Amino acid sequence: MNRDWKRLGRAIKAQREHLGLTTQQDLAHVAGVTRQTVQSLEAGKERSRMPATIAAIATISAITSAKN
């Protein structure tokens, strides 16, 4: 399966900023992952599989958006 990691990275960064999480560390803390993980995802680094981290970030985005 061909995934567009760069596009996903841009979407994650845009959503982080939309949620008012100004740093990658902010998102990492809320999602329960490391800053390096968020940095790697936002940079669009290719991965062999879809990391569970993306599900955690998506959940944070959904919860935060529902509160607004």
Image (tube, grey):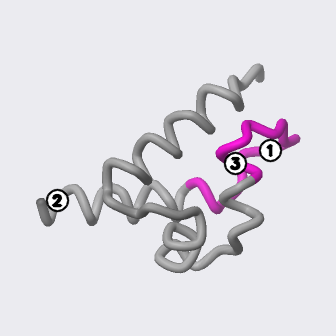
**Residue under the image location 64 percent in, 61 percent down:** 53
- Which residue type does callout 2 highlight? Ala
Q: Mark 2 or mark 1, which is nearer to you?
A: 2
Q: Position of residue 51 (x, y in %)?
A: 71, 54
Disc 2 secondary structure class: helix
Give the quadrant of residue 32: bottom right
- For the residues labelled 2 and 3, the Cα–Cα distance comes to 23 Å
Q: Residue furthest top?
A: 2
**Residue under the image location 43 percent in, 53 percent down:** 16
- For the residues labelled 3 and 1, the Cα–Cα distance comes to 12 Å
Q: Residue furthest right?
A: 48
Q: Which residue is mark 3?
A: 41
Disc 3 secondary structure class: helix
Task: Decide whether the magenta segment is chiefly helix, strand or loop.
Answer: loop
Q: Which residue is mark 1?
A: 49
Q: Which residues are magenta?
A: 40-54
From the viewer's perspective, is 48 left or right of 43? right
Please, is residue 4 above or below residue 26 in the view? above
Q: Which residue is mark 2?
A: 66
Give the quadrant of residue 61: bottom left
